Amino acid sequence: MEVIVSLAVGVMAGAGVWLVLRPRTFQVLIGLALLSYAVNLFIFSVGSLSLDEEPIVRAGQAADLAHYTDPLPQSLVLTAIVIGFATTALFLVVLLALRGLSGGDHVDGREDGA
């Protein structure tokens, strides 16, 4: 399970960095979204990875730190998803305004080689 999650985080982070370095603003937007998803998945995996078990304290075990799943990463990821969605929506509106004003969506405002 940990290998799959770490591979997913690595692939999403790598693709996100690659897209952030592209010359078009929409590709940068998608790259930032992928980076935020990779970070969210990483933070979520810090809490502990388990399948088909109670989220905080398991039945029949002592409620100490050895048998406890921390709910803080889950709440942080939920908050980050909401903030990321709002930021992406704002960036998309700015992208559409830029495209309408300049006629293109190149990051530095120029086309290739100009």
Image (cartoon, rainbow, N blue to C red):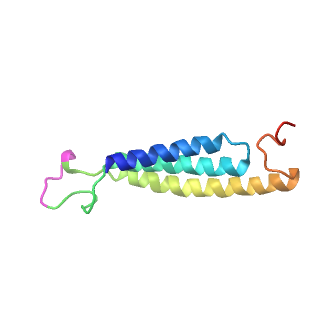
Q: Position of residue 8 (x, y in %)?
A: 44, 49
x and y percentages locating residue 93 in the rendered image: 74, 57
Give the camera-side residue of 35 and 60.
Answer: 35
Query: Which residue is painted at 51% across and 47% down in the image?
Result: 12
Q: Describe residue 17's horizontal placement relative to residue 106 as left or right.
A: left
Q: Which residue is drawn at 64% across and 55% down?
A: 88
Q: Residue at (87%, 37%) from the top-left corner?
A: 114
The extreme top residue here reads: 113
Q: Where is residue 75 in the image (x, y as percent from the top left)?
A: 42, 54
Q: Is residue 107 left or right of residue 1?
A: right
Looking at the image, is 109 positioned above or below residue 59? above
Front position in the image: 112 or 110 = 112
Residue 64 magenta-drawn? Answer: yes
Disc count in the image? Answer: 0
Residue 69, percent from left and from top: 28, 52
Q: In this view, does 59 lie to the left or right of 21?
A: left
Please tell me whether the stretch drawn in magenta is mainly helix, strand or loop.
loop
Name above or below for residue 111 compared with residue 87.
above
Q: Residue at the location (26% across, 63% down)?
A: 52
| Residue 63 part of the magenta-drawn span | yes
Magenta stretch bounds: 60-66
